[in-house]
Image: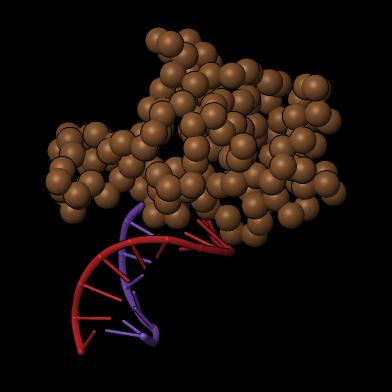
Chain colours: A brown, B red, C purple
Amino acid sequence: MQYWLMKSEPEEVSIDDLEAALSQRAAWFGVRNYQARNFMRDAMKVGDLAFFYHSSCAEPGIAGICEVCSEPYPDETQFSTVNPYFDPKSKPDNPRWWLRDVRFVSKSRLIPLAQLRACPELANMRLLARGNRLSIMPVSESEWAFITKELMGLQ
DNA sequence: GCCAACGTTGGC
DNA sequence: GCCAACGTTGGC
């Protein structure tokens, strides 16, 4: 079991949108960074858990938990000329961008970025590293345990 | 809207 | 392969 953090702009897809979605599943479309893609395509495994993080919004922070629930498959938005995520350099016979489906697990209170920063236990968390811009990144087991137990109040 | 930090592109 | 220019991310 591995743990992840996945950023989404809540104006695009929020934790509430995921909870309300058909089957409570959604395709994690729109990733256009190679490192984030590699984590999603190559390193994730079905059953891995991830923090659902709200970014580029009034209250950035962790909003809940989701579960990786599909094998990787091509992100269709890269082939649609009218889509904002269209990539003219990607070809259907050799897709550049891959995604997975995630399943809603739980919503939590919003745990603000500033609160994460204030926790000494999370000093080495990748999310908090200077200049970090990755939209998908691993979370260590100890960071996961601290956040779920101490900040979310889960068992 | 600002801007620091980073990733990508493309000429050489 | 270098690196300057440019584009993007994302908190504030």
Point out residue A68 in the picture as x, y percentages from the top left corner.
50, 30
At a point 71% along the width and 30% down the height, the residue shown is A111
Q: Quadrant of the C terminus of chain A?
A: top right
**Residue B10 left/right relative to A42:** left
Q: Is residue C9 above or below residue A57?
A: below
Residue A21 occupies quadrant: top left
Q: Is residue A14 above or below residue A38?
A: above
Q: From this viewpoint, is residue A52 visible?
A: no
Point out residue A6 in the picture as x, y percentages from the top left corner.
53, 37
At a point 71% along the width and 21% down the height, the residue shown is A109
Q: Quadrant of the N terminus of chain A?
A: top right
Asked whether C1 or A49 is in front, the reply is: A49
Asked whether A106 or A115 is in front, the reply is: A106
Q: From this viewpoint, is residue A130 visible?
A: yes
Asked whether A120 or A144 is in front, the reply is: A144
Asked whether A11 or A22 is in front, the reply is: A22
Residue C12 occupies quadrant: top right
**Residue C6 left/right relative to A148:** left
Point out residue A4 in the picture as x, y percentages from the top left corner.
59, 40
